[in-house]
Image (cartoon, coloured by chain):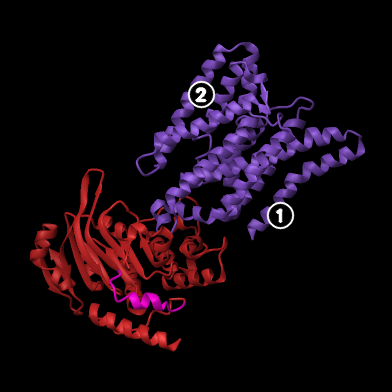
Amino acid sequence: MPHIWDISAAADCAVAAVYDRRIVGAHRAPLQRNPRPVIILISMEPIFHVDRLNYGYTHTPVLQGITADFAPSEFVALVGPNGAGKSTFLKVLAGLLRGYKGSVEFYGKPVAELSSRDLARRMAFVPQETHMVFPFTVKDIVMMGRLPHRTALFDTRRDAERAQEAMELTDTAGLSKKVFSELSGGERQRAVLASALAQDPEVLLLDEPTVYLDLKHQIQFYDILERLNAERQMTIVSVTHDVNLAARYAHRMIAIRGGLFVADGSPEDVLTPQHLYEIFEITAAVFKRPDGRGNYIIPTA
Amino acid sequence: MLCLVVLLITPWIGSTPVTWRNVIAGVSPDREIFLIARLPRILFGAIAGGALAVAGVLFQAILRNSLATPFTLGISTGSSFGAVVAIWLGLGTVVLGVPFVSLAAFVGAFLTILLVFFIARTRNALPTFTLLLAGVTLNFVFGALIMFIHFAANFTQGYMMTRWTMGSLDTADMNAVMRTAPFVIACLIALIWISGQFNPLAGGEEWAASRGVDVRRLKRTSYFIGSILTGAITAFTGPIGFVDLIVPHAIRLVAGPDHRILIPASFFLGSAFLVLCDTAARTIFAPTEIPVGVITALIGGPFFIVLLRRKRGELW
């Protein structure tokens, strides 16, 4: 189907031109089983279109009128103080919190109207921490990611291939027979990422994925995300408290405070002393990284 | 692979007493004993054991707790309460196709299910912790009520109540088999069909939801299937403990926690286990029978204590 490929390439180029400053490669990722021309053609639209989103738990409003678009292939970092609504926002995007007001569209369809299964085939969610109650192995965990794609009761060869590929990408293939609950924090989080990748997602949503990891594993984890974003054009939205790490990897940074987006732009634009004071109530010095990849901050008071 | 082995081995273990009985029946002319007394009892034991074990798997999966069983949720006790009330009111002799006591036990189980369900349910969720607490609380309440009725009842009734709450397969006949088998097998097939969805539930409800599982529907379906399986079996046998607790654990130790294997394997091991226990109950002190609940608890208790010692901290 050379023609469709051509169209998709053109479409992607257009998307790249419209939405992203950095994407050069045009083709869909090799991870995609078969090129899905329909998706590619509508990918001119934003992946997520959020309009006046409100969400509250019982009596306390958490999100108070968020409006934003997320484009394909973006690498977005959501930052903000505790209780600002970062995780809540991410879970609304993931379709895990459905009683919201306003509109949240995933490729033009309201998230609340899509079934969990439809969503899980196209987006994956990585939580802060995962506890498994039964002695599942890493392989089992990764295979759970194939559930939304599986129609038969048992795993097909394709499931096994995808799982293997996901484990290799995250460097967990050697752990596949180990029991998940006996792994170290870094290994666990990589296994969870492998499970998410086995879903073959176009969008990866991560809720403070590196909060319990040491420095080496934080960098290792974000390196994998960077590769997925660069090589497979995977859209990544990650909530994090580590603004320096976010600035190093993300292309777009959104600051949330009090359930509102208070700053949205490149990490350089968002991480200014004034913003930091307004968002985190800290005084901080902002420096340029020696390697030229964004800024970093040092809180001074 | 292990699943296949288990599946191949368990029917053999289960059927061993059958072939052994068969030989006896061939030698002596009392085919009636074999066909009317023993075969239905073994068949019913197999169905009951399998159903209880599968109910255990279900509750452990949806409550994400290896100690969750129909008993923890108050269903067994609710069922006992129904039976005890029926005996107390002297309805024990009334027969409407099924023994009235069984009917009352089923109603008791069913009402308990609804009660626990509505106590625990919030506007749009079914929180695990509340569910367990509601179950444990109702266990105490029904336990107290049973004791009270026991106290108020006369000697004969008291004896019947004690026998009933001990759990036994001696009431089983072909009628009971025919009434429960189609239902249990249908449930089993349905559960195997959706068994893959129970796996991600081990990582939490959000984990399952983000892997495409309709968690609310899955929890409701399995809660009701599990409860009704237990209710239907307990109605005929009285509460038989430990099958629902031990069998899933044993399978997890041998074949791993994958529910696609765990559910069918638990059914077969549960069948085999209960039939063996019942055979022991019938033969150890022959011609006197001891309640099968005594055997399951005596085998199950120590087994479980060993398990607790070995895997402390990992079970929940």
Q: Would you identify the image quadrant in which residue B164 lies?
A: top right
Q: Which residues are magenta?
A: A34-47
In the image, what residue occupies the spot 30% across and 61% down?
Answer: A93
In the image, what residue occupies the spot 55% across and 53% down?
Answer: B259
- Numbered disc 1: secondary structure: helix
Residue B213 left/right relative to B22: left
Q: Position of residue B13 (x, y in %)?
A: 73, 46
In the image, what residue occupies the spot 71% across and 29% down?
Answer: B170
Residue position marked by numbered label 2 in the rendering: B143
Q: Are marks 1 and 2 in contact (CB under 8 Å)?
A: no
Residue type, numbered disc 2: Gly
Q: Position of residue B293 (x, y in %)?
A: 64, 31
C-alpha distance separating marks 1 and 2 = 40 Å
**Which part of the image, by quadrant, shows the C terminus of chain A?**
bottom left
- Which comes sooner in the sequence, label 1 or label 2? 1
Q: Is residue A44 above or below residue B9?
A: below
The mark total stands at 2
Residue situated in front as seen by the camera: A126 or A5: A5
| Magenta stretch contains residue A18 | no
Name the colour assigned to chain A in the rendering. red
Answer yes or no: is residue B74 visible.
no
Residue type, numbered disc 1: Leu
Assess disc 2: are there few (<14), some (14-19) or many (≥20) residues with their C-alpha within 10 Å of its C-alpha: some
Q: Position of residue A41 (x, y in %)?
A: 35, 78
Q: Is residue A222 above or below residue B292?
A: below
Q: Which chain is purple?
A: B
Q: Position of residue A221 (x, y in %)?
A: 34, 68
Answer yes or no: is residue B285 visible.
yes
Residue position marked by numbered label 1 in the rendering: B8
| Magenta stretch contains residue A35 | yes
